Amino acid sequence: MSRPPFRQLDDRYQGEYADDVRLTSGPPPSQHPYASMGRPRSKLNPVTWGTKTCIAVAVGFVVLLIIVIVGAVVGVRNNRYPDYSPLRYSLQDTYGGPEFFDDFDYFTGYDPTGGFVHYVDQPGSVALNLTSATASSAILKVDTTELAASTGRKSARVSSKKQYNSGLFIFDILHTPYGCGTWPALWLVDQVNWPMNGEIDVVEAVNAATTGNQMALHTSKGCTMNVKRKATGEVLSNNCHNATNNNQGCAVRGEVDTFGAGFNQNGGGIYAMEWRSAGIRIWFFPRSSIPPSLDPSSPAPNPDPSTFGTPLADYPSTDCDINKHFRNQSIVANVDLCGTWAGQPEVYNTQGGCPGLCSDRVANSPEAFEQAYWEFGNWWVYQAA
């Protein structure tokens, strides 16, 4: 029996010729259209890569590995931060009452920073009422009586007889000096060995003090602050070396009411400065927000910096050896006039909005310095146990 052609197969023959249909449903493997071409190459298969491709991939891997390692190192470096674990502090010194100035020396003569001022000794300061103290506060001020102070106006500058190498310093401040031509400061320094033993500016401003308190460290070479810091103030500069940035130091600026008229109208406040191997930190507390542990009405506050919150300024020891750069510091309070900061035209006229020449105002306008005085409550100095 002859078989019908393949194209004529239908359901009638599926039973008898099913195997034949399956066998003839496509061309033999040897006749497949792609049999002679082999499998297409995959670019993702390293077996198929040429020498140049292998080298390029190896170089790329090495570069990627370097980037990862460098990124990890930079990340670790940028996140370095000292251990500010709480220390146990005990009260060492108190400055207050009618004897406030008894533990201070009076600087005399012309200002070493070029101020248009005469610093008066202790008897002269008392006679001119430049320094005075009562049971509740101490005042340090600029003279407002001399009509023509042609060689500089009289003022006072005092420094503690005792020197410190660390500690927690609490300053209760009722009034800060301000006004065109003024340069007041509350600071710590070794006046004989500056800048080798450093300087810590806790409270400082110039002229009308409309930009708030400017804190700073001044050191010899090798102390910088372009590292991780935890503070609320505005960083102005990171190099503490006195030979950089016109001796601006590593400066941090607070809000407007941290100094000057706003500070005074709010009843003043408390500045706390902790100086230890891990770093130097400064806090400011307005009169309305003083922590219970700093209550100035108590005979001796019991401060705990770990409860103070984020400081206004933070100077960690990450890239600055605190113990090396800060030693033998006395507490200094003064009101300078004009000088290398407040008296510069770009500061006095442009930034401060003050009229004429600084020296003319100081010499001939005693009434302009009615607000140029410090008023302090008590100061306390604590040492770690």
Image (spheres, rainbow, N blue to C red):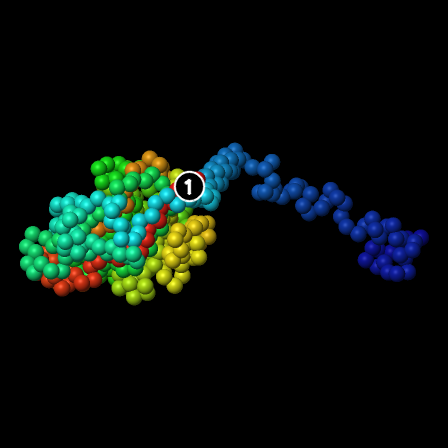
Q: Quadrant of the C terminus?
A: top left
Name the residue at 15% across, 45% down: 108
Q: Is residue 285 above or below residue 189?
A: below
Quarter of the image for residue 296 reads: bottom left
Asked whether residue 71 is in view, the answer is no
User: Quick one: SS at disc 1?
Assistant: strand
Name the residue at 39% across, 53% down: 299
Quarter of the image for residue 284 reads: bottom left
- Where does residue 129 sit, x and y in percent of width and height? 17, 56
Q: Is residue 291 left or right of residue 113?
A: right
Camera-side residue of 58 and 207: 207
> Looking at the image, which residue sits at the far right?
1
Camera-side residue of 162 and 258: 162
Quarter of the image for residue 190 reads: top left
Q: Is residue 84 left or right of residue 270?
A: right
- Where does residue 38 sit, x and y in percent of width and height? 66, 41
Q: Is residue 74 above or below residue 371?
A: above
Camera-side residue of 193 and 293: 293
- The residue where tag 1 is placed is 384
Name the residue at 46% across, 52% down: 307
> Looking at the image, which residue sits at the far bottom?
265
| Count of number-bearing discs | 1
- Where does residue 288 sit, x and y in percent of width and height? 38, 63
Q: Is residue 365 above or below residue 163?
A: below
Q: Amino acid at mark 1?
A: Ala
Asked whether residue 363 is in view, the answer is yes
